[in-house]
Image (cartoon, rainbow, N blue to C red):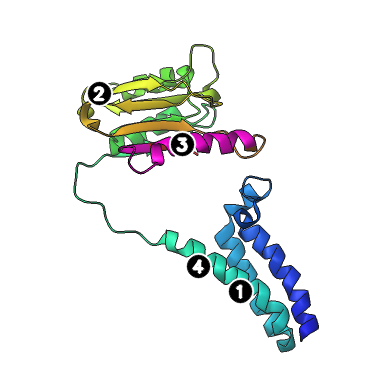
Amino acid sequence: MLRRLLVGLPVGAVGAVLLGPELFGLADAAPFVQVVAFRPVLAVAQLLFSALLVLIRRRWWAVAVPPAVVAVVALGAVLPRAVAGPPPPAGTSLTVLSFNVFQGRADPVALAATVRANRPDLVVLPEAGQRYQRRLTPLLAGLGYHSWVTTSAGEPDSDGIVVLASSRLGNVTGSPLELDTRRRWMTLSGGGLGDLTVVAVHTAAPVRDLAGWAAELGNLRQWCTEGFGPHLVVGDL
């Protein structure tokens, strides 16, 4: 049994690194950043693998125990996220639509139809620049949306964010943020937003620029810190 347990320990250790890289200081390193997104699926797969080992040969239970324990702990960490917390106190509702238009390639007609059908108060469109704004705006004529864009003329859609605010919110102001981010972000404030500030963001992707992605997540902390005031961060993280 001891020999089988010694076989199961490295299997469990590999599972622990994959399912909990932050415990080993690897949360900002590839490929662990990408794998974390699949943590629930990997944990279930690891638990099924352990059960299958026992079903094939009962005496292999000592091999199956370490990875099974790691999988149960990982599931215990992520499953509470699937349970809704207590509802917020009653207040003014704000409907927000956020959609990455993939370098300006999304169909503006279909997007305009979605906006017309749902009439959101705010629309945040990462990877949309002036070109996409010019294509979308005429399709929303008559709906009373004001729009802002973070890019200048000639910059690609992939570098921009287009933000729309319904006239129902009154005199809302959009201001591009001068931060050291790969793509410029924007804040919306005033009017019907009251004390709330909306931050439209598009962080660097954790693929070729892991350091930039981690740094930009650090920038987001200033709006997510308790006591800083009401903020809503919307976009592609």
Q: Which mark is residue 76?
A: 4
Mark 2 is surrounded, within 10 Å at the Cα level, by few (under 14), some (14 to 19) or many (20 or more) other residues, namely few
Q: In percent of the image, x 53 and y 27: which residue is there?
A: 181
Q: Secondary structure at mark 2?
A: loop
Q: CA distance from mark 2 to mark 4?
A: 47 Å
* Image quarter in which the N terminus is found: bottom right
User: Looking at the picture, how far across and down is residue 218, in whole percent?
Assistant: 51, 37
Q: CA distance from mark 2 to mark 1?
A: 56 Å
Q: Secondary structure at mark 3?
A: helix
Which of these two is toward me, 154 or 227? 227
- Mark 3 or mark 1, earlier in chain: 1
Query: Quick check: 208 above or below 69?
Result: above
Q: CA distance from mark 4 to mark 1?
A: 11 Å
Q: Residue under label 2, please give it.
A: 144
Mark 3 is surrounded, within 10 Å at the Cα level, by few (under 14), some (14 to 19) or many (20 or more) other residues, namely some
Q: Residue under label 3, please give it.
A: 220
Q: CA distance from mark 3 to mark 4?
A: 27 Å
Mark 1 is surrounded, within 10 Å at the Cα level, by few (under 14), some (14 to 19) or many (20 or more) other residues, namely some
Query: Is there a contact, CB below 8 Å, between mark 3 and mark 1?
Result: no
